Each structure stands twice: as C-alpha cells, then as structure tokens.
Amino acid sequence: MFENLSERLSGVFDRLTKQGVQDAKMRVGFVGMSFGATLGILLLAGFLFEIVSLPVLIGLLILLCFFTAMPFGSATAAVQEMVPASMRATFSALFLFVVNIIGLTGGPSMVGVLNDQLFHDDTQVHLSLGIAIVFGTSLSALLLYRGLIPFASAVENARFVNSRIVIPEVP
C-alpha cells in the first residue's frame, strides 16, 4: 500500500522532468533514501535506547518503507532514459539483475553477519537490522547524490545518439 503511494508521489518528479530538470528521476532516489536514512537513524536510536513505544517504532518502519520505495519506479525509468534506444533492453535486464542480487543477498547477509560478529547474541537482531538500514540507506543516498551530474550527462549523450539513429521504413 505505502509503496504504491510513494511511487505515485514520485510522479512529482516526472513533472520536474517535463520542466527540463534532467536529473529529476535520480533526485527521487536521493530524496527517498535521504529521508530513509534519517528515519533509520531514529529507528536505531529507538532500538538502542528504548525511548519510544512499539506503535511509534511501527510508525517509523511504515514511513521508512514509504520513503525507501520511492525510487523503485523512477530507477527503471532513469535507466531507460540514460541508455541509447538500441541498448535499453540489455541495460534494463542488467540493472534489474544487479539490484535484485544486491537486495536479496546483501541486506539479509549484512544483518546476519552483524548479529553473529558484532553482537554475538541472537536476541539483538533488531539492532543488526537498524544498523543495516542506516548503512544501506546512507550509502544509497550518497551514491545517488554523486550520480546526479553524471546522470544528466548520460541523458544528454543518449538523446544525441538517439537523434542520430535512422530507422529504415518498412515497405
């Protein structure tokens, strides 16, 4: 439910694209992950210091899911936009493969390794999860921010290449 709502919110960035902001699709990810990192820090603090109630922690998790889901739709659209038309299918497949491999293996493995190597206690999974969330969202926000200018350049290059492609007419 919240993922669908956040994907709809990312439509705001589509309007920015139409207004000429070339890195708008990357900004979706940056904004979402920046809020996600902030919420992750609050969540981790709540886990560590036990200063908030369970309903507040659940609310933070809901908001975290909302903001970290923002880049899902725009990321695929960004790949489509920055790659020349003749290479879109290949790059889309590669992008989805890499994102799924990292997402399905990296996050859960990080939680397990943190719990086994740092805490040595099976009851501290919540702290391992909090650290993994903060690390993952912070790293994502940093990488997305660093990619804003190169993304705009790649979009320009793809538009140039696409404008030079001549598609033969079928008789």
Image (cartoon, rainbow, N blue to C red):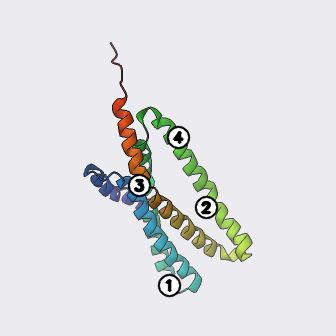
Please say if the residues under marks 2 and 1 sit with CB atoms less than 8 Å apart: no
Q: Nearer the viewer, residue 66 or 40?
A: 40
Q: How far is the residue under mark 3 from the one under mark 2? A: 27 Å
Residue marked by disc 3: 149
Q: Along the polypeptide, which appears first: circle 2 or circle 4? A: 4
For badge 3, the amino acid type reads Ile
Please say if the residues under marks 2 and 4 sit with CB atoms less than 8 Å apart: no
**Label 4 crowd (10 A; few <14 / some 14-19 / many >=20):** few
Q: Secondary structure at mark 4?
A: helix
Residue marked by disc 4: 93
Q: Position of residue 97 (x, y in %)?
A: 57, 45
For badge 2, the amino acid type reads Gly
Please determine whether, in this image, residue 46 is positioned above or below residue 153. below
Position of 37 with respect to 102 (left or right) is left
Please determine whether, in this image, residue 79 is positioned above or below residue 85. below
**Label 1 crowd (10 A; few <14 / some 14-19 / many >=20):** few
Q: Position of residue 112 (x, y in %)?
A: 69, 66
Q: How far is the residue under mark 4 from the one under mark 1? A: 42 Å
| Closer to the eye: label 4 or 1 | 4
Which quadrant holds the C terminus?
A: top left
Q: How far is the residue under mark 1 from the one under mark 3? A: 39 Å
Please determine whether, in this image, residue 110 is positioned above or below residue 48. above
For badge 4, the amino acid type reads Ala
Q: Quadrant of residue 62?
A: bottom left
| Closer to the eye: label 3 or 4 | 3
Q: Quadrant of residue 120?
A: bottom right
Residue marked by disc 1: 52
